[in-house]
Amino acid sequence: MDDSDLMDRVTPSGSSLGDAVSAGGQSEYVEEEEDEDLYYIPERRPSLDLGTSPMDTSQWHYVDQANSPVLSYSSMSSEKSEKMEKIDESLTRGVKHTACGPEQVRERVQSSPLDNFENIQLVRADSYSSCYTLDSDDCENRIPKVRNKEDTVPESPDALVLIHDPNEIRHPSLTVEFTFKAICKTLGMLSDGEMHYFKRILWRRYPQSFNTPPQSMDLLDLVDRLLECYNLEISLKLTKYVLEEIGKKKMVDYLQSLCIRNEVRYDLRQSLKKIYGEMGGDCSKQGEMRSFDDVFTNLNIKSTSDNGPNLEHEVLTIGKLDSNRKEGKQLSVQDLMSKEWLDKTNLRFLLLTGGAGSGKTMAIKKLILDWVEEKSHQHVSFLVPLPFRELKKFEDKQTSLLEIVNELYPETKQLREEDYRSDECLILFVFDGLDEFCEKLDFHNTELLGDPTEITSLNIIMVNLLRGRLLFRDVFMFTSRPLVRRCIPWDTHYDELDLRGFGESDKDEYFKKRFINPDHADRVIAYTKSFKTLRIMCYLPLFCSLVADECENIFRAKGLQAELPRSLTYMYTKLVLALTRQYRVDGAPALSPDEERDCLMKLGKTALTMIEKGQFKLTRCEWKEVGVSDDEAVVNSGLCTQYVTKPFILFQERVISFIHPTMQEYLAALYVFLSFRNHGKNIFEQQLKDRFSRMFKGHKAMEMYKSAVDKSFTYEDGKLDMFLRFLFGMVLHINVDLLKPFCTNSAKWPNMVDDAASLIKKKIKENQFPGRNENLRRCLEELGVST
């Protein structure tokens, strides 16, 4: 070995932050002892010395250059060489992969770095390592002794140089924490012998990074040292270079995959934050958009399904229907597809069901944003939301699952097919609104599909996803209204959870978060508590949102002390319009005005019949007589819900109920009102004297109301009292205007408020039914008349 060969292994002391010099050579080396006189180690100055005085070089001495490395090495006896090699090997065998690095860099980890890779915690800031250069005070340089200032170290013409372009923009995802973990995870896969070989080459190639051979360092100390002496990009390049030198090409590819996934994960999070991070105009804060977390309130999620509708009622006492009698465990959004859940159940498929307006989309938004902000679900490498409203554009196209993902989220184009199949790269696909998928799913005759890149139809993709045939290493979460069970094959293993909206305390919490002004929130909370039924219905997040919107508009126009709506009918009409109209705009098949009105009339007629019989559910066989499909009632209109009764072990029956008993009573009142308004028909008297009249006078309308009151008094349990309240509420012009889309008669509705109030006061004065007077006073409140 001549002088030039030795000098090729030494990096000049003048290297800058962006340069790391790697000397070329063979991939195998003979262990050789170094001459201690060949190098000297300058005295270290205090770290990060910001003094202005120049370095004192007066005490530097120039000495004669040492003998040739060849002479130095040849002077060593073979016995001494063997002895040193044994010492080196013993040091390697003695290395235990535990963290024992500097306290300012990381905390000590007391177990295998590979096993505890995810638990490695760094306190180093992102800019910490990049502030070092090869001449950093904390990187002790090994400088060859030279005879005079003019002598320089020759550089080998075939030396490989790792060059970092200072103009290159670093990807925001490349942080100290990621780089540290990625290199640790990659090197942790090396065997003891391979790790020893890696350190030896690192020592030979980059001696300027170490003041002692790295064989005594454990894995974490070694990576710490790299990040202290080189910037992040060079640290990764250096690691890849040495791995290639020892023949570990697959590990180089693995490290490169970690870097690519890290960039995609960062870009995907940024994209999802823009899509789901803001609430929208109804939650504006003085013109500024409020974040979703500002208004999110915990949801009532139960570990058991088939719990049936909420049966809390202001007037009636309704026993629990014969649904799932198990209370179930209370869950949070963080529990959905959590690592603990996956480990415990070993299932890859979760179905979250809930009635219309129960907060399914709100739960999905929270799940997504928690992953984006790294608050939960960090065991998931990628979270990919695929709402069915977005998937509709692919219904008539030939496509593949990967093309769909890439089109909706262009950031994922860097991912390779093997990333979707890797055990280490867990992907959570979230399909929101399975009930909005209108195509028929044929699980018996549809072709099998196991390749996510294969071009086919969306229907075939969905069938194979629901059968668990496609991407069997990833996990899937679907949300839907309850009727969707029939869309899942009987042999698919999945878990089902029930979303039931807000709990009692969550109702107040929602309004406190929704309104910036606490006085506004307190006023709205007091307002909802003044109406028991209004308070009950606030279990639906959608209903809470409607109430908040209405109150917010009034406060903005008239101030805090303005009168809030006293009509319960008004808020229910708003809810019905939101469910039947807005949902159709987003997903449900459109109906003509006549079809929509006909559907509501059939549902209302059924609701009235059920109320008179004291029924709150119908079996599917009984439902066929209604004339409205269960798809239309449960999925498209959202006015009904379906669940499975479990009275016996071997017997289950699907039944259909309205989403709440008061919705059943409202639709019954709407049926009676529209029958009179559109057809001149008094449901309680069967016909009027002039049944063909289209122009109604006040006394004829009052005949209908009088017969309804008389009918309600025939039931001692007051089962028609809430129905009567809604019916009187429809007298108000504000409600008549909202119901115009369902009216065919263009005649002006007479002002009957005074006549209706007189009728109610007369019944109260007669005092024939003392126990019913309170409910009659509620009818006066509905009319806005004081008692």
Image: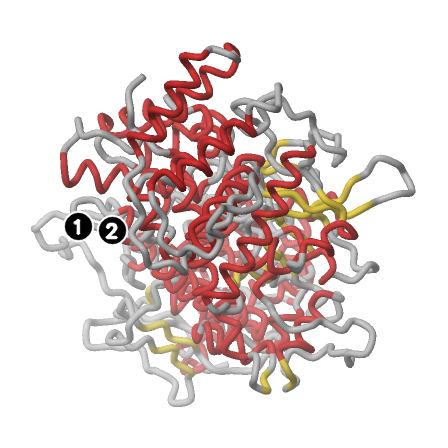
The image shows residue 716 at horizontal and vertical percentages of: 61, 19
Nearer the observer, 530 or 171? 530
Please give left or right for residue 323 compared with residue 512 in the image.
Answer: right
Q: Is residue 37 visible?
A: no
The amino acid marked with disc number 1 is Gly
Q: Residues within 10 Å of mark 1 (few under 14, many from 20)?
A: few
Report x, y in % for residue 507. 43, 30
CB atoms at circles 2 and 1 under 8 Å apart? no
* Helix, strand or loop status at disc 1: loop
Residue drawn at the location 76% of the way across and 49% of the way down: 622
Can you identify the residue that label 1 sits on?
Answer: 287
Name the residue at the left extreme. 52
The image shows residue 724 at horizontal and vertical percentages of 48, 31
- The residue at the point 57 percent across, 77 percent down is 402
Q: Quadrant of residue 554?
A: top left
Q: How many numbered badges does the structure rendering display?
A: 2
Q: Nearer the viewer, residue 429 or 378?
A: 429
Of the numbered discs in the image, which one, if any, rests on residue 775? none
- Residue 561 position by quadrant: top left
- Residue projecting furthest to the front: 689
Give the left or right position of residue 651, taking residue 151 as reference: right
Quarter containing the C terminus? top left
Q: Which residue lies at the image location 19% right of the left edge and 36% below the top edge?
A: 555
Looking at the picture, does residue 245 appear above or below residue 564? below
Residue 99: x %, y % from top left = 54, 43
Residue 688 in view:
yes
**For residue 736, side relative to residue 182 (left or right):** left
What residue is disc 2 on? 289
The amino acid marked with disc number 2 is: Met
Asked if residue 615 is positioned above or below residue 47 in the image, the reply reads: above
